[in-house]
Amino acid sequence: MTTRVVRHIAELTTNDPSLGDHSVMGRLLDAALVHDDGHVLWVGRDDEAPDADEVLDAANGAVIPGFVDSHTHLVFAGERSDEFEARMAGQHYDGGGIRRTVEATRAASTDELRATTAARAAELRANGVTTVEIKSAYELTTDGEVRLLDLAGEFSDEVTFLGAHVVPEEFGRDRDGYVDLVGGAMMDACAPRARWADVFCDRGAFSVDESRAILLRARDAGLELRLHGNQLGDTGGVALAVELDAASVDHCTFVRDDDVLQLAASSTVATLLPGADFSTRSAYPSARRLLDAGVVVALATDCNPGTSYVTNMGFVIALAVREMGMTFDEALWAATRGGATALRRGDVGRLAVGARADFVVLDAPRAAHLAYRPGGAVVQRTERALR
Ligand SMILES: [Zn+2]
């Protein structure tokens, strides 16, 4: 077992309130950190750092926990930049574009999907992501969803079955037939390959009753629950997520006061995806309103080819700070510990002794440069534990 000491950290964010300044960020200045192949062994002042087998010099840069991107649709073929261009030019987006990605993904070979997913996963990692959730959802057949989940599993342990993304073309108006398939044979084949089940519960997608039926079947099949809700309208997804004790309800662009109160009293995280609001020119949700009510907020990229082709968590943080009323520290916490909470993980998103040694060295003296220099090359090095 090799040990390594990371020296000369100008500003270390641990997200452990028992450390450093004892704020929620657990921040230390002039710090060092020791880890082995898997976990953090020691955190403290640089001038008190113990010896280790290897030394990594942070060169007076800031160090943060690796980002936990708790919402992506990473396995897909094709691209839809023309839709983005049209939308930016003022044409209405009706949500029908998912079917186009389904067509391209069904037509792609497994090797092709593996190569493009690997490239996107590498891009996320280069931008500081060390834990990524990956959903299926672009084949919408039993064999196809199985194929996508198996591919997702090559890149992450946080794999999500999202058969209920849209009703595929071939089902025409037979919504019930598709809901029965997703909750039946497709669920049976997919559940052993995933940790999570998700449903796109929204206008133009699945109703609250359809979503509830699918998610209850998922729970019976041993899956944990998360939900896309209230992105396109005030459609009841948040209340359903709370009712089912889902780990997270994602988007939350249109929420009522009673949704906010219910979320605050629950253990369901509100995951905000400002890359999607940016890319669809939608109103941003008010993170401030959620935070002030006591809701736990996470930030994720929602990386997908239609509504958020975003792989940069620094950009997501910058949007959250600029457009959603978050302080920088709230946004950094939401992109690290918040994402971990949305995945019900205690071992990532923080840098306390015993946590996974997943961290990012920044080419900046303070982590705030992630929002202060939006789009800049602030991430210098991403380190992910081997086991
Ligand atoms: Zn999504």
Image: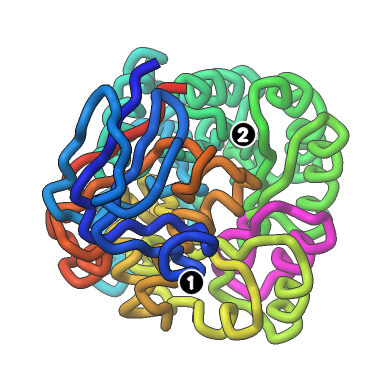
Q: Which residue is mark 2?
A: 170
Tell me where residue 342 appears, x and y as whole percent. 60, 53
Closer to the chain start, of discs 1 and 2, is 1
Position of residue 78 in the picture relative to residue 141 (left or right): left
Neighbours of disc 1 within 10 Å: few (<14), some (14-19), many (20+): few
How far is the residue under mark 1 from the one under mark 2? Answer: 54 Å
The amino acid marked with disc number 1 is Ser
Closest to the camera, between mark 1 and mark 2, is 1
- Front residue of 71/17: it is 17
Q: Quadrant of the N terminus?
A: top left
Instruction: Identify the magenta region.
Output: 228-251
Residue 272 in view (yes/no): yes
Q: Which residue is mark 1?
A: 23
Q: Is residue 73 above or below residue 10?
A: above
Position of residue 295 in the picture relative to residue 123 (left or right): right
Residue 35 numbered tag: none
The amino acid marked with disc number 2 is Glu
